[in-house]
């Protein structure tokens, strides 16, 4: 079987989709010794392929991704096989479904945030994604969703039959948390001192960071903790810094910026609490990462987050920052509760496996290609 796969997200500083593609390939390539994998990338950035089996054949088009997408949107005169050679199947890993001559097409729909909560998403994402997703979903041969929650959204919003959607979860890599960085390293490198409360994610409206700031402000005088925010600045991030200043939080809040995936575990391991009151998530990988490191988690009771956190996390209404403050106070005060969450978190995280997800994805490929032959 010859498999084409979009590897454009495998660039330096990869985050959600890039990590999905990386860990999927990392675990799938060794399982498929008799199959060929052709990775197609359209990006001006350098591809970061360290850690992937050299059997991955790479076709790197040094043009902006949006340029190739625009050409594909204009018609089917440039089928994917023009770049990959003949393939049995092409996996569109980041929403956009290209034309093919004969290859079966799988598309991963990570979430429908741009349709479910468009008010919290950048217009630069809402317009193009909402314009094409309906056609891509219906034209594909199979859809992969990270969660049952996203599957339900695809069925209800796009009208796709349930039978066409395969739920294949994300996971935390087995090596996550194996790095040697410790609390002293955090203080030397980032001036982060214990004890602290942690958030990891893009600084954008959907992640609901203002609720974290307000909740932290309500309890800060009763605890010695810093609030540490790890993540790139996204759409409308200025509102977060403005609120920090309005509340007079100053140095009690540390904005770290982007941290590579291999260094994140040190932040989770040394935190007393992880908070993630997002308004909507297709999966919510930071919740799983925190639990895998034994860090107690408070997250929002919506979308996929209860599916990921199970009974090993505490939940709040994302719109209720006062409830978040109350839960934060409870966890930081109640040592037995913290111990229980720390114990149960890794057990919940262990229910998700990249090896299992890779095997399920490979089975899906074989099923589709078998149907074609």
Image (cartoon, rainbow, N blue to C red):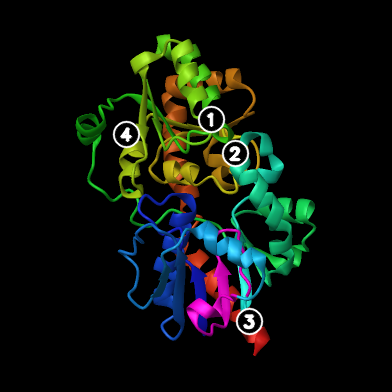
- Location of mark 4 (residue): 270
- Location of mark 3 (residue): 101
Q: Nearer the viewer, residue 135 or 194?
A: 135
Q: Residue 147: percent from the left, percent from the top?
A: 62, 53
Q: Residue at x 74, y 65 (%)?
A: 138
- Can you say whether 321 is above or below 48 in the image? above
- Location of mark 1 (residue): 236
- Location of mark 2 (residue): 122
Q: Residue at x 44, y 60 (%)?
A: 43
90 falls in the magenta region: yes
**Image quadrant for the C terminus?**
bottom right
Q: Which residues are magenta?
A: 78-99
Say which of marks 4 and 3 sits in front. 3
Callout 1 environment at 10 Å: few (<14), some (14 to 19), or many (20+)?
A: some
How many angstroms separate mark 4 from mark 1 (CA)?
A: 29 Å
Q: Is residue 264 visible?
A: yes
How many angstroms separate mark 3 from mark 2 (CA)?
A: 34 Å
Q: Earlier in the sequence, mark 4 or mark 3?
A: 3
Q: Earlier in the sequence, mark 1 or mark 2?
A: 2
């Amino acid at each position: 079987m010859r498999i084409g796969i979009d590897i454009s997200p495998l660039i330096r500083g990869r985050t959600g989709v890039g990590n999905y593609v990386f860990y999927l390939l990392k675990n799938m390539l060794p399982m498929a010794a008799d199959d060929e994998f052709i990775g197609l990338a359209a990006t001006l950035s350098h591809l970061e392929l360290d850690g992937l089996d050299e059997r991955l054949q790479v076709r790197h088009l040094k043009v902006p991704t949006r340029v190739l997408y625009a050409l594909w949107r204009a018609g089917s005169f440039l089928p994917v096989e023009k770049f990959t050679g003949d393939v049995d199947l092409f996996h569109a890993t980041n929403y956009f479904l290209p034309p093919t001559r004969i290859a079966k097409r799988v598309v991963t729909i990570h979430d429908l945030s741009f349709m479910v909560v468009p008010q919290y998403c950048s217009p630069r994402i809402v317009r193009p994604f909402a314009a094409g997703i309906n056609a891509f979903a219906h034209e594909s041969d199979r859809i992969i969703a990270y969660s049952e929650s996203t599957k339900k959204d695809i069925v209800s919003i796009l009208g796709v039959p349930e039978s066409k959607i395969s739920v294949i979860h994300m996971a935390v890599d087995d090596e996550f948390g194996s790095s040697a960085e410790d609390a002293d390293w955090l203080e030397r490198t980032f001036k982060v001192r214990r004890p602290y409360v942690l958030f990891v994610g893009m600084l954008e409206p959907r992640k609901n960071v203002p609720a974290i700031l307000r909740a932290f402000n309500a309890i800060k005088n009763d605890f010695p903790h810093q609030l540490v925010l790890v993540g790139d600045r996204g759409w409308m991030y200025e509102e977060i810094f403005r609120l920090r200043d309005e509340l007079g939080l100053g140095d009690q809040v540390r904005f770290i910026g982007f941290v590579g995936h291999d260094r994140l575990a040190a932040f989770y391991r040394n935190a007393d609490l992880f908070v993630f009151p997002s308004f909507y998530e297709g999966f919510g990988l930071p919740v799983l990462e925190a639990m895998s490191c034994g860090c107690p988690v408070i997250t929002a009771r919506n979308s996929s987050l209860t599916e990921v956190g199970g009974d090993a996390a505490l939940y709040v209404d994302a719109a209720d920052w006062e409830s978040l403050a109350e839960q934060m106070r409870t966890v930081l005060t109640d040592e037995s509760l913290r111990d229980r969450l720390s114990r149960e978190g890794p057990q919940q995280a262990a229910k998700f496996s990249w090896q299992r997800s890779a095997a399920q994805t490979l089975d899906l490929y074989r099923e589709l290609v078998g149907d074609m032959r």
